[in-house]
Amino acid sequence: MMIHPAKLQPGDRIDGFVLKDKLHQGGMATVWDVTEVDADGQPCVRTLDARGQPLPLIMKIPRIKGGEDPASIVGFEVEQMVMPALKGTHVPRVVAKGDFTRQPYIVMERIGGDSLRPRLDQAPLPFEEVADIGQRVALALHDLHKQHLVHLDVKPSNIMFRPTGEAVLVDFGLSRHDQLPDLLEEEFSLPMGTGPYISPEQVQFVRNDPRSDLFALGVMLYHLTTGERPFGNPSSVSGLRKRLYTDPVPPRAHRSETPLWLQEVILRCLEVQPELRYQTGAQLALDLQHPEQIRLTARAERMATGSTLSTVKRWFKAMGAEPKSEDGANQHVERSPIIMVAVGIKNSTPALDKKLLGTVRRIMQMEPGARLACVSVMKTARIGMDTLVDGQGNSLHVQQLVAIKHWARPLQQQLQMDEHRLTFHVLEAPDTASAIVDFATKNQVDHIVMGARGNSTLRRYLGSVSAQVVAEAECSVTVVRV
């Protein structure tokens, strides 16, 4: 028999869980701290975390009081259906669920600490913190998008952080999974989302574009940077539609010391047309982790919104624009991979360089939405001081950076790559293979391309860099030999 949520008290038992403390009571659901018990009501531990410790648990129960918005009930059904299909560090682990025939609930892992919401009240934040938050959330979104999910309600109150630093997305009631029924789209005909963060395509009833989540992240970064919302807090469809034809005030107009690179990133996330935004969370995170690599456009220098005439033109265009996206989240991510080429400056040969360039060119031609990261490792000593300048006092790091840019110039010219598709990175590390693998893992690289010299007895005995990368990398690796 279903217990009305308002009548639940500490000590009540629902299936194999005992309610302890009420942690939160919102308009849609109540969240309780719970413990597992056995058939006799004695505490037991059946669910352990990765370290073998008891997993802290919470139970989320929808508030069913009669006369409530039916979308909240459907949203809870969506969350029950979607969350068990997700895995990994960026989503709470689901332990159990109950349906509406008896008692609706979801028991899941409790993520310690507060959400990001309190930091919003302290905005504007230091720029370094804004970038750090942005890249961690972008990587979390990228992971969910690869699992066929678009969250569609990205906002500070739905973002938490593990003690180890990873961002965790919560509240999946508005989300859409490519491989599961979209109950909200089937049952309702109004835009779904949170007013300040909803994307232009969501206003136009498109729910399967992962770039909608990147737009919402851009809104959040704007607010954390300036203390202001880029589009206010509209509560009507007509108010939401204004973002289809009205530019936000550039962040530097609110906070003049905002770095050019940060304004470039934020305004790119807030482009009306999804194809003008970052195409994946991994590509956005890569820029935020390496701001010195960001190519500045007219966005970075902007200090005012567009003219009245341009706004009117965009209004007329938006009146008839009703986009339809046929692809799902995972398909879009697969079309926009990050390709990493490991360039050996000192140990390469002209023949190997030529073949490596040819291989990368063919891959990039087959992947028109790909981002290319050219990486070279500058080896440093494990113990003792390193020489960081040459005999003339010139930086060895800069010299290596110039060398990989020179290596990539034919590729850039042949493919006519724009400023957003190519970046260069010199990694200083004692172990070349480990540096390559760490960079690929941190930046969600999809494919590593690297050269390898011919075999030798010493290299076979000690092990080659390419062999170590192939063994340890989590992504595809192409090794080019002459």
Image (spheres, rainbow, N blue to C red):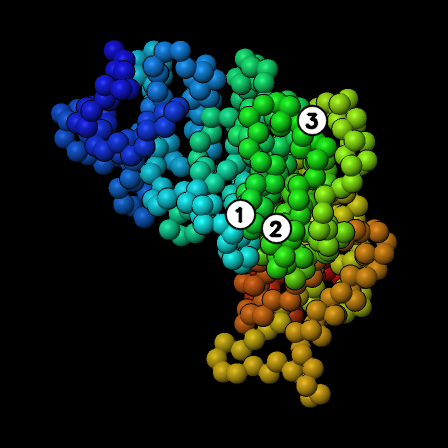
Q: Which of 215 and 228 is in front in this view?
A: 228
Q: Is residue 118 left or right of residue 311?
A: left
Label 3 is placed on what type of residue?
Answer: Ser
Residue situated furthest front in the rendering:
308
Q: Classify mark 1: helix, strand or loop.
A: loop
Label 2 is placed on what type of residue?
Answer: His
Q: Classify mark 2: helix, strand or loop.
A: helix
Corner quadrant of residue 279: top right
The residue sitting at 57% across, 41% down in the picture is 229
Neighbour tally class for label 3: few under 14, some 14-19, many 20 plus, Cα within 10 Å: few
Q: Is residue 453 left or right of residue 388?
A: right
Q: Mark 1 points at which residue?
A: 227
Q: Mark 3 points at which residue?
A: 325
Q: Nearer the viewer, mark 3 or mark 1?
A: 1
Percent x, y of residue 81: 45, 23
Q: Could you tell me if residue 7 is visible in this image? A: yes
Q: Classify mark 3: helix, strand or loop.
A: loop
Percent x, y of residue 297: 75, 53
Q: Which of marks 3 and 2 is in front?
A: 2
